[in-house]
Structures are given as C-alpha cells and as structure tokens.
Image (cartoon, helix red, strand yellow):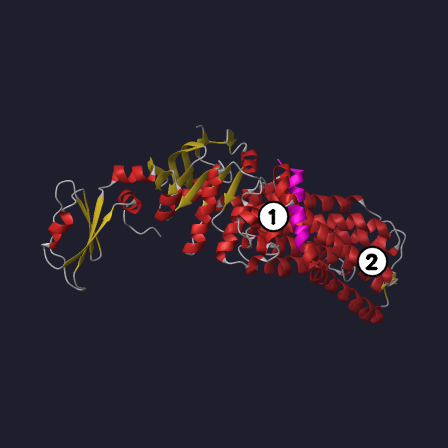
Amino acid sequence: MIDPARVLAVYRRNLLVWRKLAPASLVGNVAEPLITLLAFGYGLGAFLGEVDGVRYIVFLAAGAICMSTTMAASFEALYSAFSRMQVQRTWDSLMNAPVELDDILVAEWLWAASKATLSGVAIVVVAFALDVTRAPTLPAVFPVIVLTGLCFAAIGLVFNALARGYDFFTFYFTLCLTPMIFISGVYYPTSALPPWLETVASVLPLASAVSLVRPLVTGEWPADVVAPLALLVGWTLAAFALARWLTRRRFRHTL
Amino acid sequence: MSAVIRARGLVKRFGDHRAVDGLDLEVPAGVCFGLLGPNGAGKSTTLRMLLGLSRPDAGDIRVLGHEVPREARAVRERIGVVPQLDALDPDFTVSENLIVFARYFGARALAARRDPSALLEFAGLAHKAHARINELSGGMKRRLTLARALVNDPEVLLLDEPTTGLDPQARHLIWERLRQLLARGKSILVTTHFMEEAERLCDRIAIVDHGRCIAIDSPAGLVATHIEPIVLEIMPGRAGELLPPIEPHAGERIERIGETLYLYTADPARAAALSALGDLRVLRRAANLEDVFLKLTGRDLRD
C-alpha cells in the first residue's frame, strides 16, 4: 500500500536538496533548450521563413517546450534517481524507516515530473517574454507539459531499474531519446518524414505531446485531442507499471 | 520478560544457496543480544528479514508483537536501524540529516523533527550541527547514523556491524552510547564479528554459522560450556626452529596454526611441564570468546 504521507516526505527530501542546488540545476535544465530555441529559431528561422504557415521560431517553440520537458524528466529519473538508489544508498536508508519501495518510486516519479514541468514552463515563459507567442490558448499547454513530464519520468524509471551504471543511460539517450526527438516533429513537421517513419513517430509519446502543444502555441485548439492524450496516458501507465515491476525485481535480488 | 523479537525456523534461499537455514532467535526485552558469526553466516540476511525487507522462504517472525513481513511498516515505525554502510545524505548538514529522516516516521518522530539538538548532544555532534557530511570523520558519521536511528525514539535497535572500520577510540565511544541506551530500557540486536565487542556489550550471544544458531548463551556461559579454561599458545624459542612433538593429555585439545600450537587444557601445571621439553615460548591465558568462536565455526577462511 502506498502511503501518501511517506511519498510526500520523500518528495520533500528531493525538493530540499534541489533548493540548495537550484541555480546550477535550473541553468542545466533550461539553458540548453533555450539556446536551441534562440539559435535555431532566430538563426535558422531567418533562412527558413515560414514552416507550416507560421514563423519558424513559433513552430520550434512548441518542440522546444516538449523537448525541454522530456530531457528534464529523463535526466532526473535516470542520473539523479540512480545516484540516490545505487550510489548514495538513499533508498536503502529510506527502507530502514517505515517507507516502502512503492512510496519511493512514486515520490521519484512525481519529483522527476515536477522538475520536467518546471523546465517546460520555463520555455513557455521565455517564449511569452520574447513575444514569440502570446496566444490565448497558451495556458492549456500546462497540463500537456505535466503529462509529458509524468510520461518520460516513468519511462526513465524503467531504464533506471535496469541500469548497472551511469554508462547504461548513454544508450537510452543516444539510441532512444535523440532519434525520437528527430522524428517527433520537434525541429520539422513529421510530414517531411518517409511515410513508414511518420507512422512509427505517430505512436511515440513525444510526437503526441508536440501535436498537442504546437496548435496551442500558435493559438488554435488541436484538431485531435483524444488520440494523443490517450497515447500519452497509455505510455505513462504502461511505463510506470513496468518500472515498478522491474524495480521490485531489482531489489528482490539485492536484498 | 517477554521477547521483543522472536523468529522461528527462518529460511532464506538465494538460488541453491541457503543463506539462512532454519534459524531460531529470541531476543528478550531490555537486553543486548549479539549475532556473532563469520562473513556469509547469514547475519545481515537475518536482519533484513526481521525488518521485512527480505521475504523469508520459510519460518515466522514477530517483532514487538507484529507479524513480519505483513506488518513490516508498523515494525519499522518502532525500531531504529544502524546499517552496515552509513548512507547519510551528503547534500544535507548534520542536523538536516536528522530532521529529514524524522519526517519519514510521521508523528512518531515529531520531537526530533522540531528540534534534533538532544540527539546531536547524545551523539557528541552538537558542535557539528551545521557541518556537511564530508567534513565528518568515520566515527562521527557512525555516531550520526546512530542518532538517526533514534529519531523515532525506538524500543528496539538493530545494528549491523556498528563499529567495523572504526579506530579504538571511536569504537569505545559507540559502545558507551549503546550501554546508555540499554540503561534507558532499549533492547538491542547487534551483528558483529568482533569478539571484544560481543564480550563487552552483549548479555546474550548467538553464534551463527551456515545460516543456523549453533550456540546461544551469555559470553561467560559460552566460554564455560564450550571450551577448556586455559589456553597455552606454544611457539618455538627462535624463529625457524621446529616444535618438539607435544601430545595432548586426556581432556586436552591441540590445534596448530602456522608455527603456533594452541593447547586447550584444564591443568594449571601444564605450562611449567612444557618448558621442560626444550626451548619454547609458552603464552598462558584464560580461554575467551574467540576460542569458542573458532572452535565452533572452524578456522577456515570465509571469503
């Protein structure tokens, strides 16, 4: 049974560490997607002009929001959670207190999603401040960011449960995340892809997130809300269930 | 007094290996109970099963009246754990480590959460309240881990090799604190492979080997029951020389390790008689717990 009070206590532990390291952490989470947005958006945008009927930087803003969320969730659920689980043995200490593995896993999941949300929202704020977009539909981006954060945090925890060391995460980033970013409509429309690859992309969670965020950034409501939402929720639930199963298996072996 | 921990017929298998193999354990309230055994004897596995962190393949466990692992959370609210590795939070100060850990116990550790100064005082770390963990010595870290195990004012303390890796001064300080806790009415279960620690600290000792308790008694009781009262350590007078043949009398035992013979005897005149055999160095001492331990668990290396 999950005990919400214990989940909150573990979440607050991570929050307290983060508050001490917040400046460096924020720079890491926000700077890279921000630089991508500005460099590609203004730089490349000058050559490209309009993409899908909007200025390139407006087109890219939606991708940058989703990418920033995805990367932050992944970093936290992989490197940071792994440090706490394996290197610092924080999880072991927690389990000597009346905290169960499920409490810890839920806390890590919510925590990684929170940091992801912060990173995604930071890009929205920058895009708003730079007048890239001031669409009235912009607030509706927020729940999509939260859901995307939850989704990639859960996927990250699957790989965390399988990892033997930090090196393992390189595989996930270079073989899973990077290709996914390139085929999910972050930098260019998925319609530019060969049809078979477009089909592959359409079932991936990042493409679903982008397909929801992009119209909201340009001031329209997404034509299809149900399918991408269902995909994101499906990926999230499946990944979290798998992460829970794998993590319990991992701890059964070491204990 | 009733037992705070009672385990019957515990079995834990890892593949074909039986790490714990039918272990029975009963820790009475208010005593310090030692689990003494070589590496791999099943001590740590037993502790994890008592905490509900590892599910026994057979047997039943009751801790403070709760059934484990079914009610493990209730058990862990009422006991304190000092694990083998400190696992303190390196991102927090000394007092933050206590405050954050106290939150995991809910209402049970409210006092420590609001003001950890009494615990810091107890651990001799009041002057280090705002220090970072990497500024602490090994002994200080160990004491902080002990203080952390006390945030919930536990009735029972489980300690897994609490003084391994500490220098003698730090070790004595830990022992002294543990005796204070016993005087306050806490019960303690401690695993160790330090004979001195077991002899000084424990009221009762279970010698564990191959996942079973092979002897349970007080330290003095173990020595009286299992071993001859006098030990003669016999070495050649000069390095490189051979020992003359020495035959055990009735009721005596002889063990040889390298160039040294260990003669276990009840005869107080035996040492003088040996000197007549030639140029020997004979060290006479009273039998101790280590002799019992080596007799019962053998002298083979356990790696």
Q: How many marks?
A: 2
Taking the image as drawn, is residue B143 in sight? yes
Rendering coords of residue A241 (x, y %):
63, 42
Question: Residue at the location (56% across, 54% down)?
Answer: A88
Which of B61/B4 is in front? B4
B272 versus A102 height, above or below: below
Looking at the rendered structure, the secondary structure element under dot 2 is helix
Q: Residue at x 83, y 64 (%)?
A: A57
- Residue B30 is left or right of residue B133, and the answer is left
Magenta stretch: includes residue A10: yes
Amino acid beneath label 1: Ser
Please give the chain letter of the residue carrying mark 2: A
- Chain under label 1? B
Amino acid, disc 2: Val
Is B8 displayed left or right of B103 in the figure? left
- The rendered magenta stretch, by its main secondary structure, is classed as helix
Find residue B117 and name its label: 1
- The residue beneath circle 2 is A125
Give me the residue at 44% from left, 47% from top. Answer: B175
User: Which residue sits at x=50%, y=46%?
Assistant: B82
User: A244 or B149, which is in the foreground?
Assistant: B149
Kindly identify which numbered label has been placed on residue B134: none
| Residue A227: image location, x then y, percent | 77, 45
Q: Quadrant of the N terminus of chain A?
A: top right
Q: Position of residue B16 (x, y in %)?
A: 39, 42
Q: State the SS at label 1.
A: helix
